[in-house]
Image (spheres, rainbow, N blue to C red):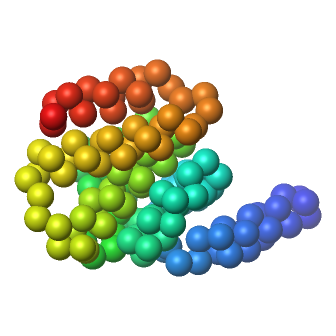
Amino acid sequence: MYIKNALIVLFTIISTTLFGQIKVDDVGDGWKAKVDSALVLIKTYDSVKYELVLKECKTINFWMGDFSSNLPPNTILISVKDLKLGSINNLACVIVHESLHLNIANCSIKMDKRLEEYTCYKYELEFLTRLPNVEPWLKSHTYENMLKFQ
């Protein structure tokens, strides 16, 4: 019991130190821990994209929409549907993808919505190529969406 409590406290301290700049809603069901794991994945495998996440995102919330999204100037909304897929790689991709949308909005870049979506999926694919053991469906999903918005 003592070891379990000590590990929980240690994880909380580490999470707060690593991601003190990003507030992740703690709504239960271990969702915050999954998002924290996705942030560690981004930081570990692509420091440039991680820096953009830190620059653009201050809050990560959850919502019941069919897809993940964002609320400029600095909030990423992760859909419950994406969470229930059970893939930390997917959550990391969502965060990377949506951070670029925030960057485009915050820099006031005027871009056709289709081109913006294509650009964000291409950015996501660049991140995916750096990850080990990526689920094939995740790569397929990204390629399909790039073709859809091309």
Please name the residue shown 78% across and 70% down the image.
Answer: 9
Residue at 18% from the left image edge and 51% from the top image edge? 116
- Nearer the observer, 61 or 105: 105
- Which quadrant is the N terminus positioned in? bottom right
- Does 67 appear above or below 49? above
- Where residue 38 appears, as percent x and y from the top left, is 55, 51
x and y percentages locating residue 109 in the rendered image: 17, 67
Where does residue 111 sit, x and y in percent of width and height? 12, 58
Q: Quadrant of the C terminus?
A: top left
Considering every residue shown, the one lying at the far right of the view is: 2
Q: Residue at x 11, y 51 (%)?
A: 113
In the image, is residue 100 above or below residue 80?
Answer: below
The number of discs equals 0
Q: Is residue 113 at least partly visible in the picture?
A: yes
Residue at left 65%, top 70%?
18
Residue 88 sits above or below residue 112 on the image: above
Could you say which quadrant of the image residue 10 lies in? bottom right
Toward which corner of the image does residue 6 lie, by quadrant? bottom right
